[in-house]
Amino acid sequence: MDNFTPVDGALHAEGVSLSTIADAVGTPVYVYSTAAFQRHARAFRDGLTGAGVTRIHLAYAIKANPNLAVLRVLANEGYGADVVSGGEMMRALAGGVPAKDIVFSGVGKTREELTAALDAGIGQFNLELEEEGEVLAALAHARGIRAPATLRVNPDVDAGTHAKISTGRKENKFGVPIDQAVEMYGRLAELDGLALHGIAIHIGSQLLDLAPLETAYRRIGALIAELRKFGHFITRVDLGGGLGVIYKAGDVPPSAADYGAMVARVTRDWDVELMFEPGRLIAANAGVLLTKVIWVKPGVINPYVIVDAAMNDLARPALYDAWHDFVAVRPNGGRMTANIAGPVCESGDTFAMGREIDEVHSGDLAVFRGAGAYGATMASTYNSRALVPEVLVDGDRFAVVADRIQPETILAAERLPDWLKG
Ligand code: LLP
């Protein structure tokens, strides 16, 4: 099922033609489908509950797509939020996520962020190192409260994904080494200002195989048993996010049902509330980046299709060699082999090389698919380009849910020091 399908030969987002959005808002622009967000959110939950995993807390990893309207759609689906900065926490609250349903992850939470999160009354801190736990405990104690927390453990598992999005090997910066977890947990559990109630992990993103997750979860199961032997009350385990999605024909990510079945099997005897932090699987295929072909430039080997979206709008191909399908909004039936690139002055601003695509000409509209996660949120204004806007579609209506921030607005925040004036 897909919410970006052709109607009378022209690609639509749900009931709205992408040409209509391009005419109204211009390009490049991210376009999201409300129905897709809802379907993905429900499918993930159903995969778990269908397998009998029912004591769950779902916290959408908002880094994947933190647009306010997206957060509201997911809050309405009963999703909490996994946040990794004070800014994300502010967004989650503004989006309508109750503070108690917010989990704060991240290896570099500042003292200011810890304080703000305590004051907001968030539901859980995932601690990344012992000193963070001590600081958080002191801050909470000074307020006469106990901060609800888990200890994030690094299970030393190779998730089998791109190195830049792998987080669960011992050399990665995340979590505390699993072989030090019991002792550290014991020390942190003594602190007055902490209500330490479990373990968290997250081993990486775009995982196409359940085996590394299962290995990691089994290690956590053994750790829980060990901690209980020492008398600790383990009531929550946060299993992180990471499930992959289909970007390209041939990608076969685990289904929500397969994942649910694995979780049910591995966690059967844990007797805890399980938490999940899915990001990509909720957002990736709920969005496209709509772009216009500026030129088709003859090349030595293949022509370059130069589009008005660039690496500053969608960084994933440049950063991770990621694949995003490219399809014409009004395909003419022809095919061509081309390179696809943006206008930014770097060779890395290339979305695809030697790819067979719909035939396009200058002025045609096209989309990069699978762009709803880690797309707009990673955009920048490099080359003094505008910050890309976002549109949310719901049935046959649409709204601009993030403005295009023009270079003049960005320039207005800069100033000359006195000595350079005049
Ligand atoms: N929880 C934690 C602690 C995380 O670090 C992440 C992602 C997630 C949950 C969500 O993972 P997901 O379900 O989306 O795989 N910019 C990269 C992805 C970075 C992911 C970072 N952490 C990309 O575009 O591929």
Image (cartoon, grey):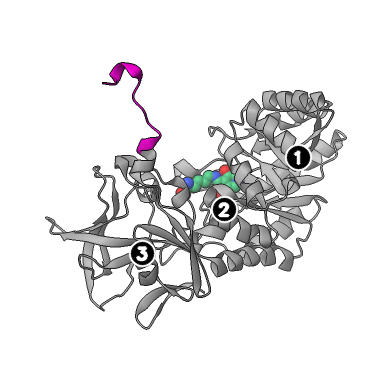
Q: Is residue 405 left or right of residue 297?
A: right
Taking 380 as reference, is 280 above or below it?
Answer: below
Separation (CA) of disc 1 from disc 2? 20 Å
Q: Position of residue 376 (x, y in %)?
A: 45, 51
Label 2 to label 3, Cα distance in Å? 23 Å
Q: Amino acid at mark 2?
A: Leu
* Tag 2 residue: 68
What amino acid is found at the position of numbered circle 3 in the picture?
Val
Which residue is denoted by mark 3 in the rendering? 367
Disc number for residue 227 = none
Q: Which residues are magenta?
A: 411-422
Name the residue rendered at 64%, 46% in the picture: 82
Category of crowding for the residue at label 2, using alpha-carbon neighbours closer than 10 angstroms: few (below 14), some (14–19), many (at least 20): some
Whether residue 421 appears in magenta in the rendering, the answer is yes
Q: Are marks 1 and 2 in contact (CB under 8 Å)?
A: no
Residue at the spot 73% in from the left edge and 65% down from the top edge = 49
Q: Is residue 228 left or right of residue 85?
A: right
**Neighbour tally class for label 3: few under 14, some 14-19, many 20 plus, Cα within 10 Å:** many
- Say which element carries label 1: loop
Q: Do we see residue 2 in this rendering?
A: no
| Label 2 residue near ligand 1, CB within 8 Å | no
SS of the residue at dot 3?
Answer: strand
Percent from the top left, x then y, of residue 39? 60, 68
Q: How many marks?
A: 3
Q: Quadrant of the C terminus?
A: top left
Mark sitting on residue 121: 1
The residue at the point 68 percent across, 33 percent down is 116
> What amino acid is at disc 1?
Gly
Sequence-wise, the earlier of marks 3 and 1 is 1
- Mark 3 beta carbon near ligand 1 (under 8 Å): no
